[in-house]
Amino acid sequence: MTGRDECGSAAIEAAIGVPAFALFVGLIIFGGRTASTHEALQSAAADGARSASIARDAETARNDAREAAEASIANQKIGCSDVEVTVDTNDFNKQPGVPGTVNVTVACRLDLSDLAVPGVPGSRVMRATMSSPIDTWREQ
């Protein structure tokens, strides 16, 4: 009568194993979304920095960087809200011929509320910063 000793063990294993597996899958999805969103933000920041670096003045650089970064995020359809683009154009005050960089930071709020994973917040603010050298011989 060995069958009697193991009666119900499959149900107990399933009751423990299924939620653990679901948690594992949820954490994998969380990691994937976070990584792909961060990569998209880096790409958007790089596009913004590249656009700003060829501008002739700081105001044009800020506008070009914002437009490029926002277009990049819209094209990638990453599902971010509250997108914020910050452009550091302080090096545009340097004289032409003096090396400088422009820095672009892109931040957004990633919605994670559809993942029912304990310990994972409903949303997460993510940001990425990239820089690009300013055209050294730009005209003023």
Image: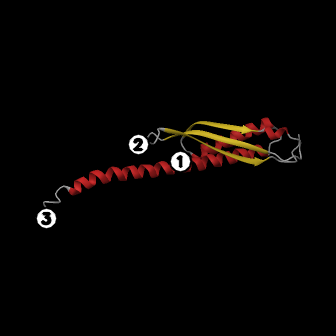
Q: What residue type is labelled 3?
A: Thr
Residue 117 image point, x, y percent: 41, 44
Which residue sits at x=65%, y=46%? 44
Callout 2 secondary element: loop
| Location of residue 69 by image quarter | top right
Q: What is the total number of numbered labels drawn onto the structure image? A: 3
Choose the circle earlier in sequence order: 2 or 1: 1
Foreground tag (2 vs 3): 3
Choose the circle earlier in sequence order: 2 or 3: 3
Q: Between residue 117 and residue 80, name the one nearer to us.
A: 117
Residue 17 image point, x, y percent: 31, 54
Numbered label attached to residue 118? 2
Q: What residue type is labelled 2?
A: Pro
Residue furthest to the bottom: 2
Q: How crowded is mark 3: few (under 14 residues within 10 Å), some or many (20 or more)?
A: few
Residue that carries the numbered disc 1 in the rendered image: 34
Q: What residue type is labelled 1?
A: Thr
